[in-house]
Image (cartoon, helix red, strand yellow):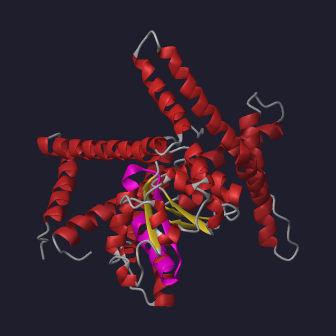
Amino acid sequence: MKKAAIISVLKHLLLNDVKIVVAAAYPEGSGIAVGILDEIGGLAEWGKTYGVDYVNLGYIGGLSETTFAALGADIKRQAPTDMFGTPYEQIPMLENIKDANDFDSVFVTTSGAGQTPLYLVRQWVITYGVHGYMVGGPGASLTWAPYYPDQFEGIIDGPLGSATYEGLLFREYNVPLGEGTRSIGFTCVTVVMLIAFVVIGNIRYFWKNRSKGSEI
Amino acid sequence: MISSSLEIWLYSLMIIGIFSFFIKENPLYHFAENAFVSTSMGIAAAMAVTNIQKIGVDVILSGAVLIVIPFILGILVFTRLSNRYAWLNRYPTAIVMSVGTGLMLRTVLESGVIMQLQNTIQPLSLTDPLQTFNVILGVAIVASVIWYFVFTRPPKYKAETYVRVGARHIIMLVFGVFIASDIFNRVSAMYTVMDALLRTWLGIGM
């Protein structure tokens, strides 16, 4: 359900005329970004132009602390062209973007509890004072709670976070609700089932061990 | 209405192929699995080659000859394939490890220790008892878990035993929440898959 949250964040940024630079830390990431943009109808649908309001730098190789540090120090050095091969100098939006100091905020999305968010926190948020935000799956707020609110100023957590964000966008900008909200019914039923199984499992455990005494 | 898009039909059949593993291993499952792995690898390889070209070869050709050093170090990684020259692999490994660790150490204390302690040890509030309770509880939980992992010797005093038992319960609770989150993550992915199959492919509303 991260996709629903990413779509909501993207719509919110586009509605507020925020310039967006996308970079992928995994090879599949740049393609996913293209797919997400298609899903919201493309930039033209939002009155934006590629290269002026939005740029996809593609996959930045070498997923490590060093890569994010190098990217923060010199964007052009790590991404001399965008995803489609257009040279950095020919992209109007990147004219005044040299390093992480030229960014106000960084949004990170990841499928699990990998190290990518930590690289960004350490090499962008702490080093350059860029505002950090996390768009994560279920449990993201638990995993990244120690980093809130100083290092991640906001965390969108799974289906509930996606649905809430969609609700806020609907209220503030009349943006139609999407997949996040649609999934809530499904998610609620599953959570009730999950709780029921946990209760059944515990009853069975204590029933089985009632004469032995408990030990953790 | 059933989709007429070839792309949607293809990924729907792939999903069914993966799910068919529930029954037993079969050629459709293997095809879907191999297609997924090989596509991922193919994309990764193509991206890697493009990156070498973009931030390596092109830069060297434009006159920055020092970039040839990382190239040499990269080639040295392959010396692992030879018993005689495998020792050369230590140089690129050492450089990558040391640079990464050095960069991490620059900020890890602030990011991983100081800022997190600041968030844990908040000022007590006389006007908000719940806030005060939360702060005290938070500090007690952090202190007891740290105690549990630092003092691994057998407890000498009764109070120490209580702290350890309490810490163990907290750790189990956190692990439980992590496992539940992981299940929730899978459920969320399952929704996406079912949505793709039922709504996008078969045109049935969800």
Q: In the picture, which quadrant includes the N terminus of chain A? A: bottom left
Which residue is at a point 15% across and 70% down the rendered structure image? B202
Residue B145 horizontal side relative to residue A65, left or right: right
Which range is magenta? Answer: A1-29
The image position of residue A135, as x and y in percent, is 51, 64
Which residue is at a point 40% across and 66% down the rendered structure image? A3
Instruction: Name the outermost residue toward the right.
Output: B126
Residue B174 visible from this viewpoint:
no
Q: Quadrant of residue B188?
A: bottom left
Residue A18 horizontal side relative to residue B201, left or right: right
Q: Is residue A21 magenta?
A: yes
Q: Is residue A13 magenta?
A: yes
* Residue B118 versus residue A169 in the image, above or below: above
* Residue B47 versus residue A181 in the image, above or below: above
The image position of residue B63, as x and y in percent, is 51, 42
Instruction: Name the outermost residue toward the front.
Output: B63
Which residue is at a point 39% across and 50% down the rendered structure image? A27
Q: In the picture, which quadrant includes the C terminus of chain A? A: top right
Which residue is at a point 45% across and 42% down the rendered structure image? B61
Between A145 and B98, the one nearer to me in the picture = B98
* Residue A56 versus residue B78 in the image, above or below: below
Between B11 and A16, the one nearer to me in the picture = A16
The image position of residue B131, as x and y in percent, is 78, 69
Between B86 and A74, the one nearer to me in the picture = A74
The image position of residue A111, as x and y in percent, is 45, 55
Residue A194 visible from this viewpoint:
yes
